[in-house]
Amino acid sequence: MSLPHLILGILKYGPQSGYDLNKAFQASVEHFWNTEQSQIYRSLAKLHEVGWVEIERVAQEKRPDKKIYHITEKGLEVLRDWLAMPQGLASSHEAWLGQVFFGIELSKGQLKQVLEQRIADLQQQLAHFEQTIPTSAALYAETYHAASDLPYWLLTLDYGLQKLHFDLRWAQTALASLDHLPEKREEQKE
């Protein structure tokens, strides 16, 4: 998946500033694509360079001009081409799983803390997604007159929620299994 394509997808609903795009990301696709505002601004600059977005400058009193980004016909064509293209499997980088993988080097108490923190983080994220995303998605659907898009948006939310529920169950099972795993290895003396 590509951040520029997601930006184009959001811009197809209407022109937005970089700040507004960041808010839209947080309210709509955060459950499957997490990004920083600085990454959005860098991508917008590149999208403008290749002609996929245009910039409208809006004068503001006592502040720099506000940049409003509009998707171009070329940008819409690129988005549609990308949407029709199979994406393959996502790469996986789970640093916390590295902690579990090499868990023999930790005390059971340390590894227990790693898993308990993972469980707490997952529970917090689940609560956020369950409580925030449906409401914000409905609001964006209303704002952008995109009621027919909402069921597709909610399909991605369902995927994210199911994945989080799986991760939570796995972490809880792993935590429960710690008592049956070998203890930390003693350092071998030469």
Image (tube, helix red, strand yellow):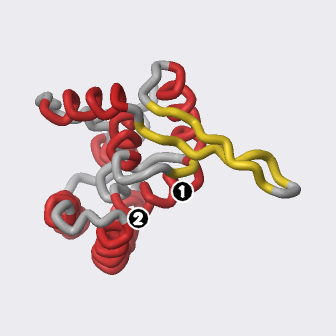
Q: Quadrant of residue 156?
A: bottom left
Q: Which numbered disc flags the more N-terminal residue, 1 or 2?
A: 1
Seen at 37% across and 49% down, the residue is: 10
Seen at 20% across and 56% down, the residue is: 181
Q: Mark 1 points at which residue?
A: 20
**In this rendering, position of residue 182 left or right of residue 114:** left
Q: Measured from the top left, where is residue 171 in percent x and y?
A: 24, 63
Instruction: Give the quarter of the figure containing the C terminus.
Output: top left
Q: Can residue 104 be seen in this view?
A: no
Q: Is residue 69 above or below residue 164?
A: above
The amino acid beneath tag 1 is Asp
Q: In this view, does 133 lie above or below 115?
A: below
Q: Which residue lies furthest to the right in this view?
A: 62
Query: Which residue occupies the foreground of this view, 81 or 189?
Result: 81
Q: In this view, does 98 lie above or below 115?
A: above
Q: Is residue 12 visible?
A: yes
Q: How many marks?
A: 2
The amino acid beneath tag 2 is Ala
Seen at 14% across and 65% down, the residue is: 151
Q: Residues within 10 Å of mark 1 (few under 14, many from 20)?
A: few
Marker disc for residue 27: 2
Q: Measured from the top left, where is residue 99 in percent x and y?
A: 37, 46
Query: SS class of the residue under badge 1?
Result: helix
